[in-house]
Amino acid sequence: MNWMERVFKLSEHGTNVRTELVAGLTTFLTMAYIIFVNPSILGDAGMPKGAVFVATCLIAALGTTIMALYANYPIALAPGMGLNAYFAYVVVLHMGFTWQAALGAVFVSGCLFLLVTLFGLRELIIKGIPQSIRIAITVGIGLFLALIALKSAGIVAASPATFVTLGDLHKPEVILASLGFLIIVVLDRLKVPGAILIGIVAVTVASFFFAGNEFHGVFSAPPSIAPTFLQLDIKSALTGGILNVVLVFFLVELFDATGTLMGVAKRAGLLVPSRMGRFNRSLLADSGAIFAGSLLGTSSTTAYVESAAGVQAGGRTGLTALTVAVLFLCCLFLSPLAGVVPGYATAPALFFVACLMLKELTEIEWGETTEAIPAAVTALLMPFTYSVANGLAFGFITYAVLKLFTGRAKEVHWMVWLIGGVFLFKFVYIGG
């Protein structure tokens, strides 16, 4: 275990091997859905689902390992929800590009993303983010997680009249998710180690008896990755018609991943001046995973907000992330076992973490509306547009406009004007 102490500096972060392993398992369980959802979405674009399944597991393991060993951060990476839907349903099915060209666009955007990070531009962007917006990022991610959790639990359902409404509270899945949430809160209050993980396991076990969940075995051989490996079409991605797609991928990757990294790192107490070197490394790890994923055959890879569940479970170092990476590799052979945990079992964990992340609201200077309103806009637009990047976009634009028209333009970092302008250009000439 000495090597773990040397590599991850566990004692310096007030943690231990057991806590980190439990935190890693917790994070994995909350985001394992991606290995089944991603092949389903990209399969709709004509991509071979088996190969996408393997690519998803491999890039999640690779990207998260780099995050663990290079940045020593408890944050996991995997193909991003939202970006995969844009890839499949907009770029391929609506705009008519081949999935190979779409992968090429992901590759080009990943290269741009990596260059921005290597030349320190991404760090400049982060330094230019006002304190109120930084706080709002954490709150917004919390609200975003809450919406995801409530939807997965069945407590919130779609409504054509009101967009969202109360789900069917008589369903066993909803009842089990609600009980799981209460179990987690009670155990956490009683300081029981692994409270979140216990809640997830308890709901999963109960699902076999009360919700018709079925056990389909443990092992299965992974399919071939050959149908998607190195199948990207970079030449088509550089043609005029798809350059707008590259820009959209780049902007969403930049601000979605950056916002998530900042929010989760702040929650873990890692976003402090003495540890910013590690944060900069995390940006590089996150950047490199995007074009690596396009080579393997999947849409853009990004930092996962579900990592906040592992942080809440005590994860503070890269050992948490390394645990997640190993579990993703195991999924190549253990997909039936990984698939046994239903979404409504992990939903209570996400909702619990979301509730705790809202406490950051107390740090906002509510008496200064030019700070408080942009923060509120940022936080609220993340869940209501189902995008971290959109929340940041509206937050930056609101911040710049309010400062300009209240005679406080000199207080604004030049990077805010630049970012706000880029987002405004995107909304006006490219769309949401």
Image: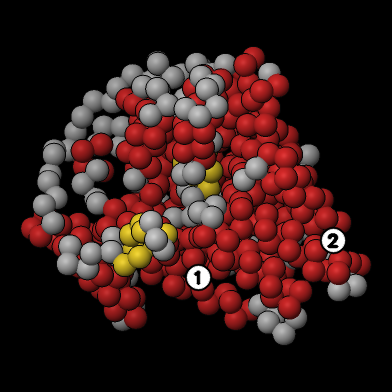
Asked if one can make out residue 134 in the rendered structure from this viewpoint, the answer is no
Q: Residue at x 20, y 60 (%)?
A: 173
SS class, disc 2: loop
Position of 19 with respect to 281 (left or right) is left
Residue carrying label 2: 413
Q: Farthest residue toward the front?
A: 161
Q: For mark 1, what is the residue?
A: 357
Residue at the image point whose x is 73% and y is 40% from the top: 429
Q: Nearer the viewer, residue 315 or 425?
A: 425
Specify the amino acid type for callout 2: His
As displayed, is residue 109 above or below residue 360?
Answer: above
Q: Position of residue 90 (x, y in %)?
A: 52, 33
**Residue drawn at x 66%, y 23% as measured from the top left:** 241
Q: Nearer the viewer, residue 104 or 193?
A: 104
Residue that lies at the very extreme toward the bottom in this rendered image = 367
* Alpha carbon distance from label 2 to label 1: 27 Å
Number of numbered discs visible in the structure rendering: 2
Q: Residues within 10 Å of mark 1 (few under 14, many from 20)?
A: many
Residue ranking furthest to the left: 209
Determine the image quadrant of residue 393.
Answer: bottom right
Residue 33 at x, y percent in the picture: 34, 45
Q: Which amino acid type is shown beneath numbered disc 1?
A: Met
Residue 316 pos. (x, y %): 50, 61
Badge 2: residue crowd in 10 Å (few <14, some 14–19, many ≥20): some
The numbered mark, 2 or 1, whose residue comes first in the sequence reads: 1
Marking on residue 141: none
User: In which quadrant of the rendered view does residue 192 lie?
Assistant: bottom left
Residue 176 x, y percent position in the rendering: 20, 65
